[in-house]
Image (cartoon, rainbow, N blue to C red):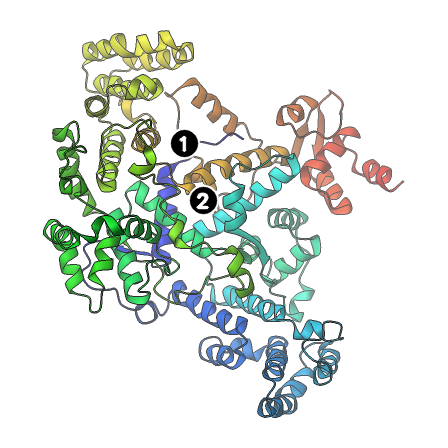
Amino acid sequence: MDSTPVNWEALDALVIDFAKSEKLIEDSFSSSPPPPPSSSMSSSSYHSRLIIWRIRRSLEAGDIDIAMDLLRSHAPFILDDHRLLFRLYKQKFIELLRKGTVEDRDSAIACLRTALAPCALDAYPEAYEEFKHVLLAFIYDKADQTSPVANEWSERKRFDIAGLMSSVLRAHLHAYDPVFSMTLRYLISIHKVYCFRQGIVSPISDLTQRLLLEERDPPATPHESLYEAPPFDEVDIQALAHAVELTRQGAIDSLRFSKGDLFLAFQNELCTMSLDVSMLDELVCEYCVYRGIVDSSLASASASDMQTVSEPKVNQPEPGYCSSRNCSLEADSGANKHSDGEASINNTHMDASPENNADVSSRQGVDVELRYACEPMRNHEDCSTSGLHQPENPRVLQRHRTHGTGERSKRKRWRGRHDDQGLIYGVPFDLRSKQELSTTTLFSSTYISNEQEGPGRPSMLDINSREDKYDIVLWMKELASQGMAAEVVEEVNAMDPNFFVQNPMLLFQLKQVEFLKLVSSGDNSSALRVACSHLGPLAARDPALLKPLKETLLALLQPNEDALGKGLPLHALSTSLQVAIGRRLGIEEPRLMKIMKATLFTHNEWFKLQMCKDRFESHLKIDSLKEVNTPLLTAAAMSNSNADSSALGSSQVTISSSTKISEDGSSPTQVSSRDVVCDENAILKVMEFLALPRADAIHLLAQYNGNAEMVIQQIFA
């Protein structure tokens, strides 16, 4: 499966917004802990989501009284709705009986008399029958799986009512998840459907299956007064139904609940999909460290501090903290190695990292031994007495360190989830043992240790410190994003003269930038020297580079314009350079990058099959993720960009032909070679009557000259 170029700056913005919305990061220079979210963010969406999580947790645990107290304090309108109140009282009755004591049985009878029976009279038409049915729980034991009320005894009921309450509360309190969380749900769900329909094995299935769970919250049902709502546009109904995999009636009910607001209905349905938030936090932290948003040392320190305070054992990390695995690996593998000289190493850290020293002294009860076993070795190579791991070019490395010190102060500190740490929000309790990923798995899958690299693995420098590696990679990325191509080439060649031999495409793109920068400054003679010395020979070895070389030289015809500023994607180039240099240093690209590349590709392909534009992509910022300008890069990159832009837009007329269908690889049948014009109303009619996806409806219409009535007659004949 191919991948789609991604606008990493747009993804950075989405990820940062997610991390800030969930209070996962804080400024690195903050010396005091942030105020509790419940006091400082009482009116925010974060606070509302936290209240919903606590209510959900109580319901899933069977603590109905606690959940009702929270509802009474924060969402009393729920208890005014007798439909929901009846379900709560019914579950409370079952939970009292489940306890099995005489006192609880008496309490269950009192609940029947004073609450459940009166509420059943006006909750909804079927409520009184349900009330009489649940009385059988007095007769049949909870262990009897063949009883008429086995379903009422099932603990699955807890999760159903918890999910229903979450859906209702989310919509009424406007406590929607951050955009990035919803975007991931949507892209992964399309990715799964596309792979299934095309018979393709997903290259990221191990990630998507664990991240997006099969479980969904029950949808919030509209009030009876909304059933008389005017009919909705069939275009909206079909768009919603196929976007979030609903039946047509389910889409209509969802639109009724949102009072006809298509995007609000879409948001409501999208948020019912269950994400493993613990794993999502890991992926986000991993990405933030890689991109320089979060300082790797501060991420490790934050995680180890919280782990030490709340969980003294290294092999039992708290969920939601990004670097637990890194800590546990270093502590386990280095326990014997550091046992003799532990004090000296700790003293070295204390001297080299005064901010860490102050951080330790400000916390009471922190296990210093564990703290420093978990922290990254900032000057690990300096602690070595063998001299075998000294860098080949100390001058270059020192410049990286000097630069990294200033850049690191601008990065954020990873906090993790400080509220309800043990709860994986949105995942039922009975699924957590199967779906939960320990946060100790974070770094080893992405960041390869020096011991694993081995002598045969290519390495730019013999560097042992992970922070030094990150300083190098992030510095090169920063230089490239600022258009300082000549400096990048010089520094990389100083570290590894063979790097560009193995990555000629990156050298060509960097020299393009250098050429355009010289043209913009008016130094045409130097620009031509760059073209003759580098661009020409590279294009001679790779004919695919001839076309971009010609287009680059056209900049000489427009000396008065800013050639470098005409859409050259410096951020895309800097990311490509970051990935390549990172791999040479043993740092693999983060898993979130792989997910985005694959899912954006299948999103493009899926809507080619649908022969329309995604109505929701702008709402979820998917369009901005695809905005990658590639006018002067390689021919391959340009062809990918053209392929992306050739996706058919939405219109009232869709042209279907055998040629286009064959190119998309989506034609299940042979159709006429003559183009067939399919009216949008005909497409919708076939989709509605036959409950077919849009692409299948178009293919059928193409066989019958766009005549919807003929298609329906032939199917039912």
Q: Name the residue under label 1.
A: 628
Q: Which residue is drawn at 46% across and 63% down?
A: 175
Q: Name the residue under label 2.
A: 621
Residue 116 at x, y percent in the picture: 64, 85
Element type where label 1 sits in the image = loop
Left or right? Give the position of 391 relative to 568.
left
Mark 1 is surrounded, within 10 Å at the Cα level, by few (under 14), some (14 to 19) or many (20 or more) other residues, namely: many
Q: Gap in Å between the C-alphas at discs 1 and 2?
A: 13 Å
- Kindly give the residue lying farthest to the right in the view shown: 717
Left or right? Give the position of 710 relative to 244.
right
Along the line of sight, which residue is nearer the eye, 504 or 563? 504
Q: Which residue is drawn at 54% across and 27% down?
A: 646
Q: What residue type is labelled 1?
A: Val
Residue 187 in view here: no
Q: Of callouts 1 and 2, which one flags the residue occurring earlier in the amino acid sequence?
A: 2
Residue 345 at x, y percent in the picture: 15, 50
Q: In which quarter of the image is the C terminus?
A: top right
Marking on residue 570: none
